[in-house]
Amino acid sequence: MSTLFGSLSIALRSLLAQQGAMGVTGNNIANVNTPGYSRQRPVLLEESPLMMGSIFVGNGVSLDHIESIRDEILELRIQQETQQQNRYDAYLSTMQQVGVLFNETQGVGFEDAFNKFFTSLQSLSTDPTNIPLRQQVITAGQNLTAAFRQATSSLSTIQSSLDKDVTQSVSQINQLTSQIADLNKQIASLKGIGQDASALEDRRDLLTGNLSELVDISVIDAKDGTKTLTTTSGAALVVGAQSFTLDTGRDVATGLVHVFSQGTDITQRIVGGKLAGQIQVRDQEIPSAQSSLDDLAAGIISNFNAAHRNGFDLNGQAGGDFFTPFTQTVAGSNAGAAASFSVALTDPAGLAASSDGTAGDNGNALALAALRNQAVVNGQSAEDFYSNLVFNIGNKISDASTQSEAEGLVLQQLNNQRATVSGVSLDEEATNLIRYQRAFEAAARVVSVIDSLTSMVINMKGTS
């Protein structure tokens, strides 16, 4: 367009385009510290040229659209690693609570109680008629059983706490999926009329990242700009503008909270996020530790009582049960043995230290003390069985800590890559700001010159 007014139109469009570009740059700078923000880039396009005679003449520039700079594949990788990172973190934090119950290095576990109990029997063998030494055996036995009851009670407390955490995590998941579905609706509406939805997409990505901290998710992009979210096992969470809530209900057999998706129990199909770590400790690790304690308690009760009944007390009577006998309520299961573990004997004189019925004999006291090194459960001594339990718990904690650290490093690297791709560089934005500013000033100068020329032409016509 060769007229003055055509040139003025080109300059004005340039002013608007450069002004819009500066606005985008200013927005980037303003959000340099905003979590989840993806830097934006103004897309400037040359206007379609006009035919003037036999040649094409340029028609200026326009701000076509604004695009957010993001790598969708990288975002998916971050979400995947976030799921595993939070799973290990949740698992580790709770298993460390379990580990405290068996912390032998600080004298918190059973080793001290074991040692004192069998040491008291060894002491009794040196003076089997001594009433204080007999009472010492009973007291040491009571301390041992109390340690079992305390441990099983603490495990139940941790499990109950995790049960509440599962319910809370499900509630948080439902809140996030509802918000993501609402953002899907807004994004689809804006894109349907050709408007920029970058800010809403950033918000959705941030919420999706928060969701991946809680549960394993798969993300599918739809053509209308919405995203479909499911668990990795296929349970629907968000489809378009609709969210699907997860429900909770108590399992009849265990009394623990289970997670349901549209009526289907998906508790054991949750494999990532904080929720998976909570469920794993609650449903696998704590019951395993509890079962080991029950087996150990049942083994000690059975073997010690049998050995005690082989001896004679201070009055020459056949020995009875030292520990309260345990009866299985379910065949093959020792469930409840640790919780009910207690000393049945109350009279020191009733302790069967003699093997031949004479008051001064220490044969059975020695036999009872020797149980320390004899197999009482699964072919192992009580101490060996317990040591293996402590080792397994410590090993699981160590493995989880290693995995958590490894996942943390991977996630940090991915976030650094994301910062490189989508993060705001103040140096780069400062450079862009100068570029757009100078372009704006140049366009303004063109407007000023054309205004002067237009006035000159008008004045020339007025004097002709």
Image: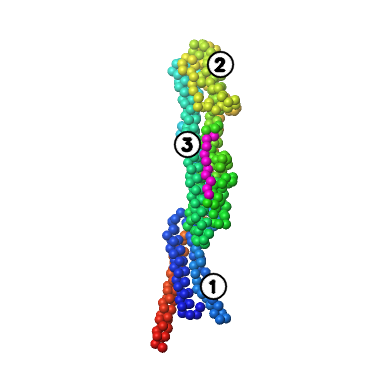
Q: Where 455 falls versus 95 (above or below)?
A: below
> Secondary structure beneath disc 2?
loop
Q: Earlier in the sequence, mark 3 or mark 2?
A: 3
Q: Earlier in the sequence, mark 1 or mark 2?
A: 1
> Secondary structure beneath disc 3?
helix
Residue 129 position, x and y percent, is 47, 14
What is the spatial separation of the Cα atoms under label 3 and label 2, in whole angstroms?
45 Å
Q: Amino acid at mark 2?
A: Asn
In the rendered image, the quadrant that contains the C terminus is bottom left
Residue 76 position, x and y percent, is 55, 52
Q: Where 407 falls versus 356 (above or below)?
A: below
Q: Amino acid at mark 1?
A: Ser
Residue at position x 47%, y 36% in the image: 161
Between residue 427 and residue 23, name the one nearer to us: 23
Residue at position x 45%, y 71% in the image: 15
Q: Amino acid at mark 3?
A: Ser
Q: How many marks?
A: 3
Q: Which mark is residue 444?
A: none
Is residue 406 something one can see in this rendering?
A: no
Quarter of the rendering containing residue 305: top right
Is residue 181 something one can see in this rendering?
A: yes
Residue matched to label 2:
310
Residue matched to label 3:
161
- Is label 3 in contact with label 1 (beta carbons under 8 Å)? no
- Which range is magenta? 242-251
Residue at position x 47%, y 29% in the image: 150
